[in-house]
Amino acid sequence: MIRFENIGLRYGSGPEILRDISFMLAPGSFHFLTGASGAGKSSLLRLIYLSLRPTRGSLTVFGQNIDDLSRDQLPALRRKIGVVFQNFRLLDHLSALDNVALPLRMAGLAEAQVQDHVSELLRWVGLGNHLDAKPPTLSGGQQQRVAIARSVINRPRLILADEPTGNVDDGIGMRLLYLFEELNKLGTTMIIATHNEGLVEQFRHPRLHLENGTLTVIPPAGGSEG
Ligand SMILES: Nc1ncnc2c1ncn2[C@@H]1O[C@H](COP(=O)(O)OP(=O)(O)OP(=O)(O)O)[C@@H](O)[C@H]1O
Ligand SMILES: [Mg+2]
């Protein structure tokens, strides 16, 4: 699914923030991505989403080396990836329902089904009473849930979530994690960047840990299942 080989990344002429990163993720795997603020979690996710190019090394996504990808192959590849950005990136002039509906409408799904699927998912994340609300009128945690709903609505093969529980209380955080678990059981590969140690400890998944520019894969506590 994803293969990093000796990947290095620097912004402009700054220092290398990722150094000699090598790891491989199998289809259907579930990993947390941890590390202090500034360790490079968001940058690593941006590399996988191909919104950032590594400065060195070799990167393979969905079995394709990104150096062999042409510009016009990029949109099709990105459609297989659901992303939850750290700052949500919702469209402020569209309702919650229309924000979440975007990927389905782009895929050409019939409007009646779009309405059904989207309202069901938004109810599930606790936003049944906010279908018509525009993002600026929602709280941070509510916007976060809209962003998560949008990232999962079209059942992408890979989900990259950047601090998806950063703005919600623990109850909702657990609920969102269970949603990711369910999708993972259906075959979606998951990578979740988080600071929330408590949450990480409640799920038996390995973690990719970033420190001083290097990455270590840490098996889940108490066993190797994951
Ligand atoms: N666009 C950019 N230009 C220059 N430097 C950047 C840019 N984006 C990130 N950096 C730097 O790269 C390093 C890693 O940033 P990144 O956002 O990947 O960290 P992070 O682990 O996601 O942190 P956080 O937990 O605070 O979200 C930081 O030192 C940051 O200052
Ligand atoms: Mg970040």
Image: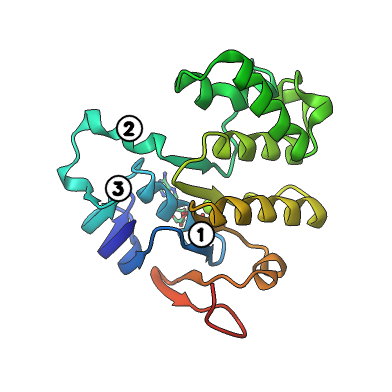
- Ligand 1 closer than 8 Å to the CB at disc 1? yes
| Residue with the mark numbered 3 | 12
Mark 1 and mark 3 lie on one chain; the one further toward the N terminus is 3
Secondary element at image label 2: helix
Secondary element at image label 1: loop
Q: Indicate the quadrant containing the N terminus: top left, top right, bottom left or bottom right.
A: bottom left
On screen, residue 208 above or below 149: below
Q: Which mark is residue 57?
A: none
Q: Where is residue 111 drawn, in percent x and y?
A: 59, 14
| Residue with the mark numbered 2 | 76
Tell me if I can see residue 59 in this picture: yes
Specify few, some or many for label 3: CA neighbours under 10 Å numbering under 14, 14-19, or 20 or more.
few
Instruction: State the separation of the CA atoms marked 1 and 3.
Output: 16 Å
Instruction: State the separation of the CA atoms marked 1 and 2.
Output: 30 Å
Q: Does the residue at mark 1 contact the one at mark 3 (Cβ under 8 Å)?
A: no
Disc 2 residue type (three-letter): Ala
Q: Which mark is residue 38?
A: 1
Q: Where is residue 192 drawn, in percent x and y?
A: 55, 56
Q: Where is residue 83 drawn, in percent x and y?
A: 50, 42
- Ligand 1 closer than 8 Å to the CB at disc 3? yes
Residue that appears at 55% across and 50% down:
162
| Quarter-of-image position of residue 10 | bottom left
Secondary element at image label 3: loop
Specify few, some or many for label 1: CA neighbours under 10 Å numbering under 14, 14-19, or 20 or more.
few
Q: Where is residue 184 drawn, in percent x and y?
A: 54, 55
Colouring style = rainbow
Residue that appears at 67% across and 73% down:
201
